[in-house]
Image (spheres, rainbow, N blue to C red):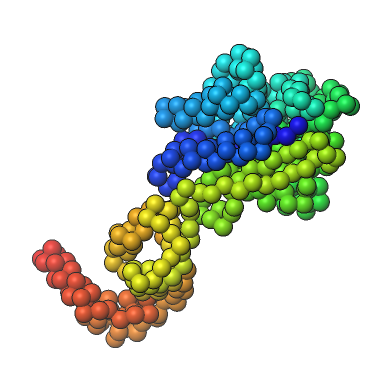
Amino acid sequence: MRFLHTADWHIGKKLHGYDLLTEQRDAYRQIKAIALAEKVDAVVIAGDLYDRALPGEDAVAVLDQMLVDLNRQEHLPILAISGNHDSAVRLGYGREWFASTHFYLKTTVAEGLHPVTVGDTQFFLLPYFEPFAVRQLFADDDIRTVTQAMVRLVAAMKATFDPAKKHVLVAHFFAAGSQHSDSETLVQVGGLNAVPTDLLRDFDYVALGHLHRKEALQSEPTMKYSGSPLKFSTSEAADTKGVWIVDTATTPVTVTFKPLTPLHDLVVLQDSFDHLMDSQQQYPVTKEDFVTIELTDTAPISNVMQRLKTRFPRIIELKRVNQLTVTPKVMTTQETQRDPLTLMGDFFEQVTQHELTAQQRTWAKAALQAAEKGEN
């Protein structure tokens, strides 16, 4: 069979205060178009359908529209799990009758042990979990870590493997190679320790969610993060977002990446303030794109954000590339006796490596006069 692997939709997420529902609807339209063009037999969503455990009404309506469209209108089976951003209880409401339309939504660890069979493939749908849930499931107080939990879970899943079928694990956690230093194995992502990929070798494909970059497991040809459909942070600005098409007819399975084109991109611009404000300077952005500005200037700039927004309305971050390291100057007794305006000018030049402009000197003088009047 052939299926589409996606994850981390985070419906309802905001990007530095900007609503992303329009961008999320557009990403969904592209995912649906890929699914239809590739004639997939099912769509896998590996967790974090919502961005919050208590999503807003608009987010609930948008996700409902997407799922109904895929499942009821296009008659595509959906295999989905809850992620760490989802409320398993709220998301899982109604899942027992969802299965009547081939919408398989699993939100508890116990459900992940019983495969869903579609075509020639058994799907094990393992939602995000904490070790205590597995400890309770197996009534085993020795299960304390995620690795110990996965050893038991994988063994239980393998016991139900049909040798005549392919086996796919859908999960939402941080997976890493087994060759780690002690410090690396202590790293946590989203509250969950790394799961050694060696534990997952018996699956023909592992469809992962949780990390937002498809490159997270580059060394694993049949274990993939789909990444998020949108760029959700500046660190993802250079990423290409998309989905995986997985074909189980081959051994090993065939995996092909299909990119998505952002409706409104997230772009990092590094330049001086004067260049950024120069209408003759062209940048690869539109008025609707999200922009992080990395200023190369060292001088202070008044109302810098407001002025930059006249050209780039959707700035999400403003950074300084060339931060100055200032060593405080030791002043002599005579120097400390100078008039306040001179002292202010010297301090300003020491910190910024620029002299006060005539306008700044006028403002400083007026401020000092007002302060002196207030003391009298």
Which residue shows up at 76% across the image and 23% down it?
117
Residue 304 visible in image: yes
- The residue sitting at the right extreme is 163
- Indicate the quadrant containing the N terminus: top left, top right, bottom left or bottom right: top right
Report the side of 258 relative to 60 (left or right): right
Q: Looking at this view, is 44 or 371 the one in front?
A: 44
The part of the image, by quadrant, that contains residue 162 is: top right
Above/below status of 374 relative to 10: below
Which residue shows up at 57% across the image and 16% down it?
94
Which residue shows up at 38% across the image and 80% down it?
353
Residue 173 visible in image: no
Image location (x, y in percent) of residue 105: 63, 23
Q: Looking at this view, is 135 or 219 the one in front?
A: 219
Image location (x, y in percent) of residue 97: 61, 13
Q: Looking at this view, is 117 or 135 the one in front?
A: 117
- Indicate the quadrant containing the C terminus: top left, top right, bottom left or bottom right: bottom left
Image location (x, y in percent) of residue 48: 58, 34
Q: Looking at this view, is 52 or 20 the one in front?
A: 20
Report the side of 374 relative to 11 (left or right): left
